[in-house]
Image (tube, rainbow, N blue to C red):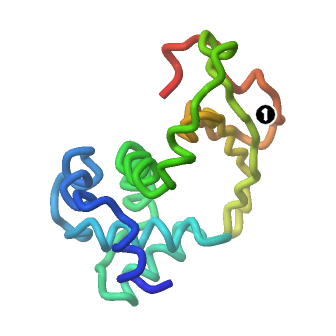
Amino acid sequence: MDTNDLIKLLPSVYEQSCFDKKAITRKRTIKNPLDLLRLILFYLSGNKSLADVSRFALLSGIGKISDVAFMKKFVQCRDWIKRLAENILPNAVMHYKKPDWLKAYQVLAADASDIAEKGAVKRLWHLHYAVDLFSLACSQSRITEQSAGESLKNFSSDKSAWS
């Protein structure tokens, strides 16, 4: 799949929503939503370090961005990525009707994945993620140190903590 195929899957307002959701607030190194999306997809495409993203940005002509700056930008993109995902998924899946007997409950699937840093330190992190089974929206996510094991204790039962 090339960039043009990806753009066809995006909602027609993906560029405007990037600014609305504050994924890009100032046009410094990353000047447009497509470049930001390219960096995010590169980072998420499998075992890429933040340093790899910095090199990719420079080599692909996006510009010079430090690993720390990209991580801050990546965190800033949460609401924009959520909006894009909601609009890319097939409508039949996104609006699967919750059975009446579950109306009072939010039904979640929770899991954790390991994230290994590259470099001399090679620290291991855990990404804990809970998704609503009927909307497929992220309900909660949390990154913890390696010492925090996979447990439902990593999620809040307080509804105000949910996205």
At a point 67% along the width and 16% down the height, the residue shown is: 102
The residue lying toward the viewer, choosing from 3 and 78, is: 3
On screen, residue 142 above or below 75: above
Q: Secondary structure at mark 1?
A: loop
The residue lying toward the viewer, choosing from 90 and 23, is: 90
Give percent across and percent down for residue 19: 20, 52
On screen, residue 99 above or below 129: above
The residue lying toward the viewer, choosing from 11 and 67, is: 11
Q: How many marks?
A: 1
Give percent across and percent down for residue 39: 42, 71
Give percent across and percent down for residue 160: 49, 14
At a point 45% along the width and 82% down the height, the residue shown is: 56
Horizontal arrangement in the rendering, residue 135 relative to residue 61 (left or right)? right
On screen, residue 107 above or below 31: above
At a point 51% along the width and 38% down the height, the residue shown is: 95
Give percent across and percent down for residue 91: 47, 49
Quarter of the rendering containing residue 129: top right
Quarter of the rendering containing residue 152: top right
Provide the residue designation for mark 1: 148
Horizontal arrangement in the rendering, residue 26 relative to residue 104 (left or right)? left
At a point 83% along the width and 35% down the height, the residue shown is: 149
* Residue type (three-letter) at the residue carrying disc 1: Ala
Few, some or many residues within 10 Å of mark 1 (<14, 14–19, 20+): few
Quarter of the rendering containing residue 30: bottom left
